[in-house]
Image: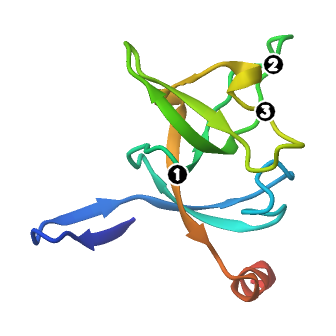
Protein backbone atom coordinates (compact mmCIF):
# COMPACT_ATOMS: atom_id res chain seq x y z
CA UNK A 1 0.00 0.00 0.00
CA UNK A 2 1.08 3.54 -0.65
CA UNK A 3 -0.56 6.77 0.48
CA UNK A 4 -0.78 9.92 -1.63
CA UNK A 5 -1.99 13.35 -0.51
CA UNK A 6 -4.15 15.00 -3.14
CA UNK A 7 -4.29 18.70 -4.03
CA UNK A 8 -7.36 18.98 -1.82
CA UNK A 9 -5.48 17.55 1.20
CA UNK A 10 -7.30 14.21 1.21
CA UNK A 11 -5.20 11.09 1.66
CA UNK A 12 -5.62 8.37 -0.97
CA UNK A 13 -4.32 4.88 -0.17
CA UNK A 14 -3.41 2.86 -3.25
CA UNK A 15 -2.31 -0.79 -3.33
CA UNK A 16 0.97 -0.99 -5.27
CA UNK A 17 2.58 -4.10 -6.72
CA UNK A 18 5.63 -4.95 -8.80
CA UNK A 19 5.00 -6.82 -12.06
CA UNK A 20 7.74 -8.41 -14.18
CA UNK A 21 7.34 -8.09 -17.96
CA UNK A 22 7.50 -11.31 -19.97
CA UNK A 23 7.63 -11.20 -23.75
CA UNK A 24 8.21 -8.59 -26.43
CA UNK A 25 4.73 -7.20 -27.09
CA UNK A 26 5.38 -3.90 -25.28
CA UNK A 27 8.76 -3.11 -26.88
CA UNK A 28 10.22 -0.52 -27.08
CA UNK A 29 8.45 0.87 -23.98
CA UNK A 30 8.89 -2.19 -21.74
CA UNK A 31 11.32 -5.07 -22.36
CA UNK A 32 11.28 -8.68 -21.20
CA UNK A 33 12.45 -8.71 -17.57
CA UNK A 34 11.54 -5.07 -16.77
CA UNK A 35 9.98 -4.57 -13.35
CA UNK A 36 6.92 -2.30 -13.42
CA UNK A 37 5.27 -0.41 -10.57
CA UNK A 38 1.51 -0.97 -10.86
CA UNK A 39 -1.34 0.71 -8.99
CA UNK A 40 -3.92 -2.01 -8.39
CA UNK A 41 -7.43 -0.90 -9.15
CA UNK A 42 -6.35 2.38 -10.73
CA UNK A 43 -8.77 4.20 -13.02
CA UNK A 44 -8.29 3.21 -16.69
CA UNK A 45 -7.58 6.02 -19.13
CA UNK A 46 -6.75 6.09 -22.82
CA UNK A 47 -3.02 6.01 -23.48
CA UNK A 48 -2.10 4.32 -20.19
CA UNK A 49 -0.37 0.96 -19.95
CA UNK A 50 -2.38 -1.44 -17.83
CA UNK A 51 -2.29 -4.97 -16.44
CA UNK A 52 -5.29 -7.03 -17.44
CA UNK A 53 -6.78 -10.44 -17.98
CA UNK A 54 -7.10 -11.40 -21.63
CA UNK A 55 -9.98 -13.63 -22.71
CA UNK A 56 -9.23 -17.36 -23.08
CA UNK A 57 -7.63 -18.58 -26.29
CA UNK A 58 -9.82 -20.25 -28.98
CA UNK A 59 -9.46 -23.67 -27.28
CA UNK A 60 -10.70 -22.18 -23.99
CA UNK A 61 -7.31 -22.20 -22.25
CA UNK A 62 -6.59 -19.19 -20.02
CA UNK A 63 -4.00 -16.66 -21.14
CA UNK A 64 -1.49 -15.13 -18.72
CA UNK A 65 -2.07 -11.71 -17.16
CA UNK A 66 -0.78 -9.13 -19.62
CA UNK A 67 0.50 -5.58 -19.94
CA UNK A 68 -1.26 -3.71 -22.77
CA UNK A 69 -1.86 -0.15 -23.94
CA UNK A 70 -5.40 1.15 -23.40
CA UNK A 71 -6.48 2.75 -26.66
CA UNK A 72 -10.09 3.84 -26.24
CA UNK A 73 -13.13 3.15 -24.12
CA UNK A 74 -16.36 2.01 -25.71
CA UNK A 75 -19.34 3.48 -23.91
CA UNK A 76 -21.94 0.87 -23.25
CA UNK A 77 -23.01 -1.52 -20.59
CA UNK A 78 -20.67 -2.86 -19.50
CA UNK A 79 -17.92 -0.47 -20.69
CA UNK A 80 -15.20 -2.14 -22.77
CA UNK A 81 -11.67 -1.07 -23.79
CA UNK A 82 -9.75 -1.44 -27.02
CA UNK A 83 -6.20 -2.61 -26.25
CA UNK A 84 -2.97 -2.64 -28.24
CA UNK A 85 0.62 -3.73 -27.88
CA UNK A 86 3.43 -1.19 -28.36
CA UNK A 87 5.27 -3.62 -30.66
CA UNK A 88 3.32 -3.88 -33.94
CA UNK A 89 5.10 -7.16 -34.80
CA UNK A 90 4.06 -9.06 -31.65
CA UNK A 91 1.31 -9.45 -29.10
CA UNK A 92 -2.45 -9.75 -29.01
CA UNK A 93 -4.61 -6.70 -29.55
CA UNK A 94 -8.32 -5.98 -29.73
CA UNK A 95 -8.16 -6.82 -33.43
CA UNK A 96 -7.65 -10.46 -32.33
CA UNK A 97 -9.59 -10.63 -29.05
CA UNK A 98 -12.08 -7.76 -29.38
CA UNK A 99 -12.54 -5.01 -26.80
CA UNK A 100 -12.11 -6.26 -23.23
CA UNK A 101 -14.48 -5.57 -20.33
CA UNK A 102 -13.37 -2.79 -18.01
CA UNK A 103 -13.46 -5.20 -15.04
CA UNK A 104 -10.67 -7.24 -16.70
CA UNK A 105 -8.30 -4.27 -16.13
CA UNK A 106 -6.76 -4.77 -12.69
CA UNK A 107 -3.94 -2.21 -12.56
CA UNK A 108 -2.40 0.88 -14.13
CA UNK A 109 1.34 1.01 -14.81
CA UNK A 110 2.93 3.94 -12.97
CA UNK A 111 6.47 3.36 -14.25
CA UNK A 112 9.44 1.05 -14.61
CA UNK A 113 12.09 0.47 -11.95
CA UNK A 114 15.62 1.35 -13.07
CA UNK A 115 17.74 -1.64 -14.17
CA UNK A 116 20.26 -1.11 -11.36
CA UNK A 117 17.52 -1.38 -8.72
CA UNK A 118 16.06 -4.46 -10.43
CA UNK A 119 19.47 -6.18 -10.33
CA UNK A 120 19.84 -5.29 -6.64
CA UNK A 121 16.33 -6.60 -5.83
CA UNK A 122 17.03 -9.82 -7.76
CA UNK A 123 20.04 -10.57 -5.51
CA UNK A 124 18.05 -10.34 -2.28
What residue is disc 3 on? 92
Q: Who's the residue at 80% across and 12% down the image? A: 60
* Mark closer to the chain start, 2 or 3: 2
Q: Who's the residue at 46% across and 30% down the image? A: 73
Q: Who's the residue at 59% across and 22% down the image? A: 99
Q: How crowded is mark 3: few (under 14 residues within 10 Å), some or many (20 or more)?
A: some
Residue 103 percent coordinates (x, y): 46, 28
Residue 93 percent coordinates (x, y): 73, 31
Q: Who's the residue at 74% across and 50% down the image? A: 86
Residue 49, relative to residue 35: is it above or below?
Answer: above
Front-most of residues 1 and 106: 106
Residue 42 percent coordinates (x, y): 40, 49
Q: How crowded is mark 2: few (under 14 residues within 10 Å), some or many (20 or more)?
A: few
Horizontal relation, residue 104 to residue 88: left or right: left
Residue 108 percent coordinates (x, y): 50, 52
Task: Tell me how far mark 3 sits from mark 1, CA to CA.
Answer: 17 Å
Task: Tell me how far mark 2 sits from mark 3, CA to CA.
Answer: 11 Å
SS state under label 3: loop
Residue 68, relative to residue 95: is it above or below?
Answer: below
Which label sits in the foreground, 2 or 1?
1
SS state under label 1: loop
The disc label shown at residue 48, or none: 1
Amino acid sequence: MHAFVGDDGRVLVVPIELVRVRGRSMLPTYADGDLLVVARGGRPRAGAAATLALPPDPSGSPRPRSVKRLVRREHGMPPRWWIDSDNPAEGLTSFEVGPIPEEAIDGIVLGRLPALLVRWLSRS
